[in-house]
Image (cartoon, rainbow, N blue to C red):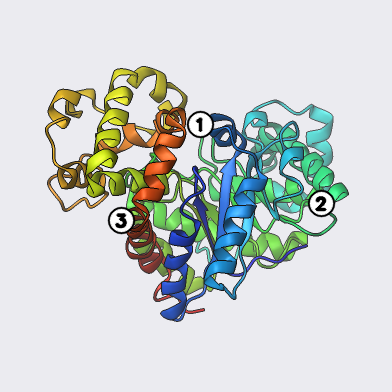
Amino acid sequence: MRTLPRFTFGVGDRFAHQAEAQLAAFERLAADGVVVAPVWNKSNREHTFIGSEPPSVRAAAAAAVAARKWPHPWFVDADHIRLETVDRFLDSSDFFTIDVADSIGKPANDADVAEFLARHPELTSAVTIPGIAQPIPLSAEASASVARTYLLACREAGEIYRHIHGRRGDDGAIEVSMDETDIAQTPPVLLVILALLADEGVPLQTIAPKFTGRFNKGVDYVGDLAGFEKEFSDDVAVLAFAAERYGLPRNLKLSVHSGSDKFSLYPVIRRIVERMGAGLHLKTAGTTWLEEMIGLAEAGGDGLVLAKEIYAYAYDHLDEFCAPYATVIDIDRTKLPAPADVASWTGPQLAAALRHVPSNPAFNPHMRQLVHVSFKVAAKQGKRYTDLLVANRDVVAKQVTENIYDRHLRPLFATTGA
């Protein structure tokens, strides 16, 4: 299998115009002495909304890598694939995020659960794990409950992995995603899940659990930071233990989905990664699209006109655009400026409202979240939108590069070492 480096960072490029600007941020970090591998990702849903095809992601990434002569590893992620969608990604991807969230909670039969517990008597009582002060609280009843909830999801992950392996052999890195569900997977639950995946023969190198707290799109984490720190640290210890105990890849690491803009978590994550010598995959969620909007606003002229139009349309269709993302956004309608007011704003005013700088009193997290989930409006504009990206390439690229480097890569990785 393709072996992932210690640090990987997922970047989306919904309209396939910012790969070079994104890569420039990784170059700056490499110049600081830390190499992080970019992973370009685009989900089946996003391809459907935009009207693009998976090979376009590899083409844009490969062109950027060639143009900038990037000498380090890079990947293209088949993001949130399922068995019914994976085939269109097989030829152009080398990183596969297997999403089994829809199968979580489908009850496994009692015989399968009993068979799992018979294979894993170590999970029927408390488990001592290096790096965790107290034993992980498990029992036969608790592990049976987890297996009943997650066994079919893990079996599905195995089926999808074997399908990928049948077509690509070992030429692909595997991630399993379980974050798009309602209930967080605590460290004891994660340990049982990893045993289930090992039984299925899935050589996952990253796993994306649902963490406690809210990971809203485009804004900071909402939750107990101290609680997250303990949970994340225990999760890292669980992964190291499971890799050794169940024969999973030794570079198995946590994946933080919707990890962009979670500025309050970055010092926590960095401390744990440094202290435990762990790896990390963090995947951004739409942040580059937002920087395109900010860049068009800053550019003024026709770019600013279109940015205002996109916001006005999103404002008028708020329920439509927000419904699919209800669990990962938190918008107070009363704090959204009326389009008639935004129409009189300057470019820097609109950019400041959307740019995620919490210390700036002009920043509006509600406006940012609404624009975040409204990229379909730009897609409907077609060439009008992409032509403006080309016409304002330099100012847009500046926003993209600075956002990834200054607000994401440096806080996460600049002091972690190679």
The mark lying in front, picked from 3 and 1, is 3
Say which residue appears at 74% left-offset and 64% top-offset.
2
Looking at the picture, how far across and down is residue 297, in whole percent? 25, 44
Type of amino acid under label 1 = Asp
> Are dots 3 and 1 in contact, CB under 8 Å?
no
Say which residue appears at 23% left-offset and 42% top-offset.
301
Is 416 in front, or is 36? Answer: 36
Tag 3 secondary structure: helix
The residue to which callout 1 is attached is: 182
Count of marks placed on residues: 3
Q: Distance between the residues labelled 3 and 1?
A: 39 Å
Say which residue appears at 51% left-offset and 74% top-offset.
35
Mark 3 neighbour class, 10 Å CA radius: few under 14, some 14 to 19, many 20 or more: some
Mark 2 neighbour class, 10 Å CA radius: few under 14, some 14 to 19, many 20 or more: some
The residue to which callout 2 is attached is: 201
Is 317 in front, or is 385? Answer: 385
Above or below residue 48? Residue 347 is: below
Dividing the picture into quarters, in which one does residue 63 lie? bottom right
In-image side of 411 versus 236 (left or right):
left
